[in-house]
Image (cartoon, rainbow, N blue to C red):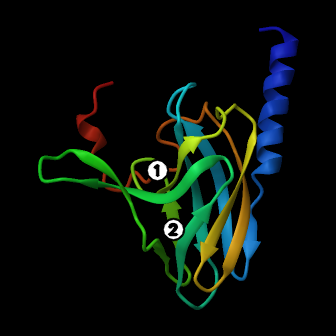
Amino acid sequence: MSFKPSVFAGAVALSLSVFALPAWADGIMVKDPYARASASMSTSGAAFMMIENVTGADDQLTDVRSEAAERTELHTHEEDENGVMRMLHVEAGFAVPAGETLKMQRGGHHVMFLGLKQPMVQGEIIPVTLVFENAGEVTVEVPVDLERKPMHGMSHGKMDHSKMKP
């Protein structure tokens, strides 16, 4: 491996970590935000993050906004009676109980960008405003990370790894 690609990869990783600093507002801390597009020519994409409520009062994530897409919504995945996963817009938003963390991750709750105005490019930053019932608005700089591993940040608590093929 040559030195230049190593230095470039390190610089990209460092810049992503610098921009992914936690965002704070009235006891709400947003950690590890990142965004992905499903393909290079996608018209939709998603953002994931951990939202920690460090207050003594419950809160509710009620809305999300971004200029990156024609519509930005709060979504989740739900399994139907046939075992098929479907993505749903959650108009009421998500509870963020006191002292707990809302995990917005692949296969679960997430921010959905519909009608992307331009492609999501590795390393770029997407400004996203999260709207909370009590904490108000929290603006987060979300780095585009198209190289993140599929299971990063996902809980493995209920997975049975004993049946997985090597």
Instruction: Determine whether 63 is above or below 81 in the image.
Output: below
Answer with the quarter of the image where residue 76 lies. bottom left
> Going from the N terminus, do you reach mark 1 or mark 2 first?
2
Instruction: For mark 1, give the secondary structure.
Output: loop
Tell me how far mark 1 sits from mark 2, CA to CA. 12 Å
Instruction: Determine whether 60 is above or below 155 in the image.
Output: below
Q: Amino acid at mark 1?
A: Met
Residue under the image location 75 percent in, 51 percent down: 20
Q: Amino acid at mark 2?
A: Leu
Residue under the image location 85 percent in, 31 percent down: 11
Q: Nearer the viewer, mark 1 or mark 2?
A: 2
The residue at which mark 1 appears reads as: 154
The residue at which mark 2 appears reads as: 102
Instruction: Determine whether 67 is above or below 50 in the image.
Output: above
Instruction: Determine whether 111 is above or below 40 in the image.
Output: below
Residue under the image location 84 percent in, 23 percent down: 8
Is 138 in front, or is 2? 138
Q: Quadrant of the C terminus?
A: top left
